[in-house]
Image (spheres, helix red, strand yellow):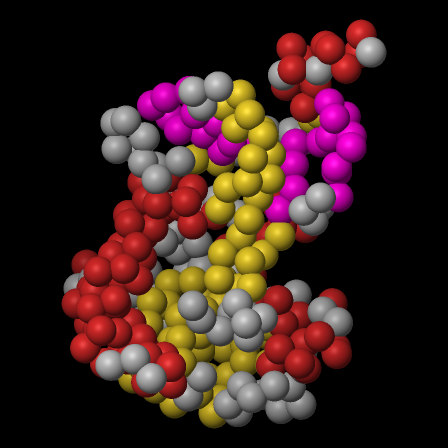
Amino acid sequence: MAWRPTDYLIEGELDNRNPSKVTGWMKFTGMKDRVIFDLEGNFHRDIRGAKIRLRGDGESADLEVAAKYMDGFAQTQKGSVGDMTAGREPVDYVSYPYWEWYAQNGRVVVELEPDQVEILTQPIPACESDPLDRKKQAENMANFLCGVASACGIPKQRAITTGNTVAVERAKKVIANNKIRGMKLLTKEIREQLPPLYSQDGKGGKAVVYTKYFTPSSNWTWLATEGEPVLDESQNEVDYKFFGLVFGHEKEFGYFLLSELEEVRGPMGLPIERDLYFQPKTLEEIAPEMFRKEERK
């Protein structure tokens, strides 16, 4: 539930050298001029007080698609800083670059890889500043949900309740899980590798598995062969759906969502992890017993 223009970011600079203020600019494919930032708030402690440079892959994006997505994006983003971090130590939020703010377009999130961020000036020593107030961040989310609710004709009281008990609580779980696992479950590389849903239909054991997720404290495993974003009516990505082979109480094929993987914990309270050393291989290489009947035919 956010505007996510990561795929269209070309470059940008954000500056937190003035306390409680983040200024700067970003350049997006699909927009003629730079987007200017005038936000109240601070970076997380890993880069607080610093000026940073961002580089994206937006120049390779389809111009027509980008222009359609960025249509209506305000040229000046004036509002509040959400969670902005390069994912460095000390990790108070997530362990990868994450840039969130609340302005005219509601909530906006840009997620990058570590090599796409350059620290231009020295941050304030982490020991000299406190972590961001999570209550304040929850209020930012609740205010954003109030705006969404107002547009939908839902009473604000119900929106705030939703924010406190669903959206904010889910965000807390995902944040906590990311801190423990120290990784993103769905990276840019995996998105590029995974073919769209139904594209490997009919391949049987020859279908290729591209990524593996598992619970460290049980035998549950998710092997993804396909995947694609889940979009809302405005064509904003709200989740990601995978298809593949699941090892649980038994071995079976099925769909599973990124949100489910992010929130679930195993028997010992540990979050699901991605196998960092997994290399693509066919289903019949992983579970040959499931395809022996096909060979006999």
Query: Residue at coordinates 66% horizontally, 65% vertically from top-left?
Result: 57
Query: Residue at coordinates 31% horizontally, 36% vertically from top-left?
Result: 265
Rendered position, 101 above or below 227 = below
Write down the quadrant of residue 55 in the picture: bottom right
Tell me which segment is drawn in magenta: 199-227
Query: Residue at coordinates 65% horizontally, 10% vertically from top-left?
Result: 289
Rendered position, 263 above or below 45 = above
Is residue 84 highlighted in magenta?
Answer: no
Name the residue nearer the viewer: 285 or 120. 285
State left or right for residue 140 relative to residue 249. left
Name the residue nearer the viewer: 254 or 19. 254
Rendered position, 95 above or below 117 = above
Name the residue nearer the viewer: 291 or 25. 291
Is residue 220 highlighted in magenta?
Answer: yes
Residue 286 seen anywhere in this rendered image of the structure: yes
Q: Quadrant of the N terminus?
A: bottom left
State left or right for residue 281 relative to residue 6. right
Residue 275 seen anywhere in this rendered image of the structure: no
State left or right for residue 269 relative to residue 122. left
**Residue 202 coordinates in the image, percent (x, y):** 78, 32
**Residue 139 coordinates in the image, percent (x, y):** 21, 73
Query: Residue at coordinates 47% horizontally, 92% vertically from top-left?
Result: 76
